[in-house]
Image (cartoon, helix red, strand yellow):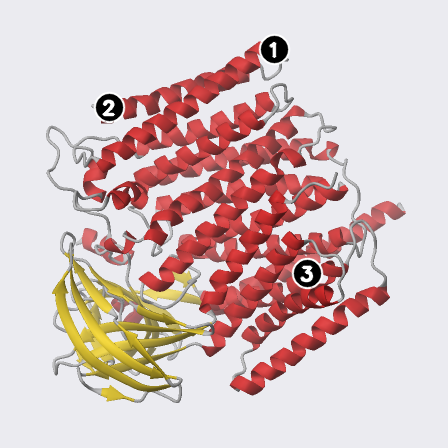
Amino acid sequence: MLQVRKNRLWKLVTILFLSAGGISLILFSLNSKLDLFYTPSEMLQADIKSGYRIKLGGMVKNGSVKRDGTIIRFLVTDFIKEVPVIFEGVPPDLFKEDSGVVILGHFLNGTFEAEEIFAKHDENYMPPELTIDEAKL
Amino acid sequence: MIGEISHFLSLSAALLLSLVLIFNLFFFFNKIHQNQLTLSTRLFNQACWLVFISFGMYVYLAISDDFSIAYIASHSNSQLPAFYKVTSIWSAHEGSMFLWIVFLTAWSILFINSLDKKHPLKKLTLLMLSLIILGFLLFLLLTSNPFERILPFGVLEGADINPVLQDPALAIHPPMLYLGYAGFVISFSFITAYLLNGNFELQWEQDIKNWSFMAWIFLTIGITLGSWWAYYELGWGGYWFWDPVENVALMPWLAATAFIHSLFASSKSNVLKTWTMFLGILIFALSLFGAFIVRSGIIDSVHSFANDPERGLYLLSFSGLITLLALTIFAYRLPLLNSSKLVVTGSKESFLSMNNILMVTSIFSIFLGVTYPLIIESISGEKVSIGPPYYNTIFAPLILIAAIFIMLSVDALWQRSMTLKTLFITMVAPTMASLLSIYLIWQATNIFSILAYIGIFSGSLILFSYLFRTINKKFINKGSAIAHVGLGLLFFAVSMNSILSYEKNLNLAPGQSISVNESVQNFSFKDIRVFKASNHDVISAQVLLLQDGKEISLNPQKRKYATRGQITSESAIHASVLKDTYLTIGDQLENGSWTFSLKINYFIKWIWFSAALMVFGILLTIFKKKPS
């Protein structure tokens, strides 16, 4: 083989090797850092390791919000199953009973411990799963 | 009536642009005569003016409260100040598409007329520009018509703009951002025209350099304004959320940053030409991808507009077509494009190229982060989302390597290799100084976070490199130095912010006071007042803080807007050099007490300041006098 070609081959192999390494590192980091999205029924069915961080989406059940100092407890429902949620802090303005929420946190001993509550710019926001489910009903 | 004229003018603009397109296509394989080129330029100019006049009339319609126009009726209100009546135009999808077209047109007409009358690339640039503008005009008229009437009668009162959008920073954030995105239509069209033309002896860098720098400035200002607004208006106390829509704005920004660097190198020492062309195509392709993500609502995000599959499909096909077209031309010409010289190892260009690779790597990582949930969902049906932890771990090492290359390039020379000895000397002082500053910060704060310390170290490396060079009185390119110091400061501020900032949730009754910690010795909730303002009700708390021996008065508010019934929080912010005291009021409990969220945000102002430095640095580069 010509020297030039040999060099080119080596370069190509190195580039391929490095990018493969890079991509697998990224994918590895992706897999450990992504948050799965569940509705209450999906979450209760799925076998989730306790302490594993997920996103829970649903409606805040009417009449379920209880405040105790800076701690808020409420139920998130998809009209089939309900999950009790506990959160410390000031929730976003759009957080209210009978409206959609997405909560980041983990499920521990039957309670969902929320790290963060998301609400949308749009006051009519609903988690996409619920819109689909309602359409089915 | 004015609505119909405005609509008609936009339609005529589309028609005229198709004429220009066909006209120029006709001469695609033939030499165009000078008169014919002048004619097609004139037609193009007229089409552009039709768009401007049409938009001007639309602005008039918004100011004069023409609620028979469906879009204005659902996004404006007669009670709004005139300023917000105008900005309500870009508060939702149709109007912001219109604005985006106006900016595309404005950049195009300015650029085309700045070119020499006989410029050999004029014909093909006109072709590309009219194709792109026409594509978006048709998108506007066919899928997102802002001129639609409510028939037979209009409504008496508009539905009002979303109150969180009634804010000066947010009023100018979209225009700045669009000006940035749209500005890269110039480099995109010009590079594609150059590749189509096939005469590679032509110089093209100088013609688009300053245009690209200007577009970069607008893009940077746009992103910074959005982040600033989110910080003070949304009440979360954060400035960047790695939200999909922020990510799709960051990708073109990174590509644009890589582009202006390699454009600089290629116009300075004739290297990286092919690479620069590729980046020029990439920026606009990423902007179009961003438009698709935001407008189609395919990814769930706080910025999602009303979702419409038809719009998504159109945008996807159009941006795919444009991108594919440009990349095909690029690939077709690639074998002939070896005009540029090789980069000398150890020269300034070599470090600059390394950072270019890093920037493209980060674009790829963000792209993967944005699209991965879509891929997973289509394969397994599982819903996933990717948050800050992913981006932080990806960016920390990239930032570190980038900082090292910036440090090296500060002392490196153009086109000449640096000896190992100088390389070593260059590295020693900033590295030692940065290690020392990390040690001092660790001693002072007693906090250890590997990611944040990587960021602080990277920032310090850049800052100290420039500092030592200034002390040694060596030559410094001011524009570049200021922009890079801005970047160093940004790394530093973001990292310090992440380790030092904290949040306390409090629960107090009016008249009560408590001690929070050593810094906030006393938090006293004086009173709460309820009153009416022009278009909203206000609940305003009066809080007196004793912070670091100083008394601070804060008035966080909650507002309820009459027309939409929407509630917003107005955080009270007290700013000092090092930190912001950020107070948000929560809800009232049954026993009459209220919840508060007190956030102490360190170095947040330094983040905006560093963005301002970057913009200022690039401005200096544009207006630098050419050495005669």
Write down the quadrant of residue B462 in the picture. Answer: bottom right
Pick the front one: A22 or B254? B254
Which element type, helix, strand or loop, lies under badge 2?
helix
Which chain is indicated by disc 3?
B
Q: Name the residue under label 2.
A: B4
- Judge if badges 3 and 1 mark residues of a common chain: yes
Which element type, helix, strand or loop, lies under badge 1?
loop
Marks 3 and 2, Cα distance to the nearest angstrom? Answer: 55 Å
Q: Name the residue under label 1.
A: B33
| Residue type marked 2 | Glu
Where residue B593 appears, as percent x and y from the top left, is 17, 81
Counting residues from the start of the chain, the first of labels 3 and 1 encountered is 1
Which chain is indicated by disc 1?
B
Question: Residue placed at 36% from the left, 44% from the top?
Answer: B296
Which chain is indicated by disc 2?
B
Question: Residue placed at 66% from the left, 75% from the top?
Answer: B434
Which element type, helix, strand or loop, lies under badge 3?
helix
| Residue type marked 3 | Ile
Write down the quadrant of residue B135 in the picture. Answer: top left
Compared to A67, does B484 lie above or below? above
Q: What is the crowding at mark 1: few (fewer than 14 residues within 10 Å), some, or many (at least 20)?
A: few
Compared to A37, does B202 lie above or below? above
- Say whether residue B591 is visible: yes
- Say whether residue A113 is visible: no
- Judge if badges 3 and 2 mark residues of a common chain: yes
Q: What is the crowding at mark 2: few (fewer than 14 residues within 10 Å), some, or many (at least 20)?
A: some
Marks 1 and 2, Cα distance to the nearest angstrom? Answer: 38 Å
Counting residues from the start of the chain, the first of labels 1 and 2 encountered is 2
Q: Mark 3 points at which residue?
A: B406
